Image (cartoon, grey):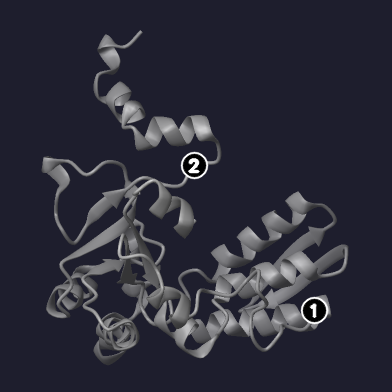
Amino acid sequence: AAPLLVKYEVPATIFIVSNIVDKGLWLWDEALYYLTSHAPVGAYSIQHNHRTLEFTLHTTDDRIQAWTGLVNTVLYESNSRRWKLIRECQDMLGIGLPSTPPAANRSMNWDELVSLNPLIDIGSHTRNHPILSTVQDPDELASEILGSKKDIEKHIGKPVTTFCYPNGLAPDYNEFSLREIKHSGYECAVLAHGGLVTPSNSNMYELPRISAQKTLVTYKSEASGLRHLKEKYSKYWS
């Protein structure tokens, strides 16, 4: 996307999970996507934390549905439990996970990030992508929020001032993560819901955003603000 953004002079921000870039690691949900995409056709049953997860892998829709179900199962669990499920999936599906992500699944590397046009800003998305409201240890929370900022600044050589909440919905952050973000020196933080930024919702550490859309028509309606205007003035809209 970078060449198109620069061509049309559209400013953008890329939010970095610093350990994924720094160590060439898998992002946990990408690992599950790889496994459900590459596993043999069949019906499967996995035992995870006293739950039975059953799914079939026959069609593309099956695989997307299986991936979504697995992700939602461990979304609010620790990284160690997420990777426990990934190991269980490898055993059950009979497929190994490459030690480093292939091209289709890897993140940008530091050289690619440094070479970006200045029109494209780089922000933090934590070190390991935990749901911040589930992180109870203050040191771990600081490592994820401040540590990621320091990691990225060390590699790109300029301040990191923006933060993006992992998953970014209302249950995914709390007063402790908000406080840590402010104390870490970020100027703003963005959510993954809520619509347009307006004077009435302009808390700089809870900035709403518009979700990605599946069709060009719905994208134009969202990005232009038309849908939100229609909702606001629905009684005048025929």
Q: Is residue 78 visible?
A: no
Task: Name the residue nearer the viewer: 136 or 98.
Answer: 98
Q: Which mark is residue 92?
A: 1
Q: Residue furthest top?
A: 238
Distance from the alpha carbon under mark 2 to that under mark 1: 34 Å
In the rendered structure, which amino acid carries the disc numbered 1? Answer: Met
Image: 32 above or below 169: below
Question: SS at mark 2?
Answer: loop
Q: What residue is rendered at 47% in x and 51% in y?
A: 4
Q: What residue is rendered at 72% in x and 77% in y?
A: 89
Indicate the quadrant where residue 73 lies: bottom right
Percent across and percent down for residue 30 are 60, 71
How packed mark 1 is, by other alpha carbons closer than 10 Å (few <14, some 14-19, many 20 or more), is: some
Task: Name the residue nearer the viewer: 12 or 31.
Answer: 12
Question: SS at mark 1?
Answer: helix
Q: Which-is-in-front pick, marks 2 and 1?
A: 2
Count of marks overlaid on the render: 2
Residue designated by label 2 = 213
Indicate the quadrant where residue 36 lies: bottom right
In the rendered structure, which amino acid carries the disc numbered 2? Answer: Gln
Query: Do the CB atoms of the residues marked 2 and 1 lie less than 8 Å apart?
Result: no
Q: What residue is rendered at 45% in x and 36% in y?
A: 219
